[in-house]
Amino acid sequence: MENLIEGIMKKTRRVLSALMLLAAGWAKAGDVTLSPDWTFYNPCANSGLSNQTATSFDFYVRTNTGAGRPKVYQIFTPVNMSGIGAAFSVQFDAELLGWCQNPGAVGSWRLTIGDTNKNSELIGLVGIGQNDNRTDALKIRMDGTAFSLTNPVAAPLGVAGQSWNVRAMYPMPNGLVNNGNRLQQPAPGGGTHRFFMNAVRVSATELSVLVKWQIIADVGGDMHAGDGTELYVLRYDETTGFIGDLNANTPTDTQQSDAWGAGTATRATTDATPQPAGSLNQLNFFGMTFEVNDPFGYSASNPLGNQDGGVRITNVRVGTENYFKPYTQITGLTRDPISGDVTIQWNSFQDSTSSGSKYNVTAVDNLEDFPTATPFIMGIPANSSGITTNIESSTTAPARFYRISLDPRPPGI
């Protein structure tokens, strides 16, 4: 997905306002009305949901026996995803309610959005707790069985599916993982974290998908507010399961994803039944679970003892925002009248890690040249300040047009 952003450079030195060419049909941001009553599945009867409002709840998770894991979710008025440019968005703030000392809890916090009509979901796998051997914080997964057809309350919700071979680092300077500032300790020392989930229709069969994690209140007094990480796929073909940006970057255990209809080909050797063709035309639920039996406890050797815990969720917003749009918006263009050097600045993800978002810059003398032009520079890392700068040297054309685009997310290691 690309946002076309153009600046016309004249020979005299000036700073120009960025122009964004928006495709027809971009949905305007608008919140979906949520109910203060969240559905709570508590199979072992030892977890809890309290302080519910339409935008917040406390989700306590105790040790489970394996009979089922607690889940909280809400089904709401569907957001139409059929038109090109349509977007579905969720954001919320989170604090831990207890220490997470379980080294097996990496990726266990599952954030889910989906469609009850297609019975499919998109899952953000968030790494919590302490695991010195893991540096990846986020993964994305598709699943074609969001809800049990015989017992909708007992939804799998974040259990199955195929993870994509892309990953993101923890939202910390240089991707550090061993200084206790991940999502491991309760507030206030553990800080406040903001999560974003986004799906945007970019063609009749393709979606762009984003999961973002940002620290919005300091962690442990170490001044990490503003640090973030993100995971995005620019072109996911929902009828084939392929990620169009990277041919080799398909769901890890199959060549296709089972979400929202996987075309007419067989997804995997274990599934000999072709899936019906179909495209996502709505999203209408959001929820979460912890996909381990004991996400916050540890063992007898844990000096903190057997821990219960959970998450405090606040400021939930469900709407139609396109979180991709601001992150390629040019904020400044300046050309030096003597050297011809053009300084370009644009909004970017606040991600300072080496595996974070990357940008491409394309420049042409004539607008009609954009379809065939290749970027003059690729793979520019996002600056952690949220503003990224690049220079094109010694330009001479009376007019110059620029486009900033996100680079495909690098594959996992």
Image (tube, rainbow, N blue to C red):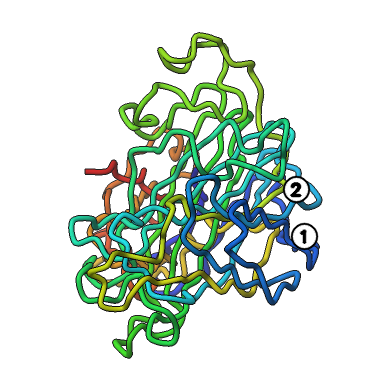
Q: Position of residue 281 (x, y in %)?
A: 72, 35
Residue 349, placed above or below residue 245: below
Helix, strand or loop at disc 2? strand
Label 2 and label 1: CA atoms lie apart by 8 Å
- Nearer to us in this view, 332 or 272: 272
Say which mark, if any, is on residue 79: 2
Mark 2–mark 1 CB contact (< 8 Å): yes
Q: Quadrant of residue 59?
A: bottom right
Q: Residue at point 33% right, 81% down? A: 224
Look at the image and tell me whether residue 266 can be seen: yes
Amino acid type at mark 2: Val
Which residue is at 26% across, 55% downward? 355
Q: Position of residue 275 (x, y in %)?
A: 59, 16
Is 310 on the left or on the right of 229, as rendered?
right
**Residue 283 quadrant:** top right
Q: Is residue 279 left or right of residue 123?
A: right
Q: Residue at x 54, y 51 (%)?
A: 69
The residue that label 1 is drawn on is 32
Of labels 2 and 1, earlier in sequence is 1
Q: Secondary structure at mark 1?
A: loop
Vertical position of residue 413 compared to residue 7: above or below: above
**Type of amino acid under label 1:** Val
Percent across and percent down for residue 149 are 71, 31
Q: State whether residue 29 is above or below residue 360.
A: below
Q: How many marks?
A: 2
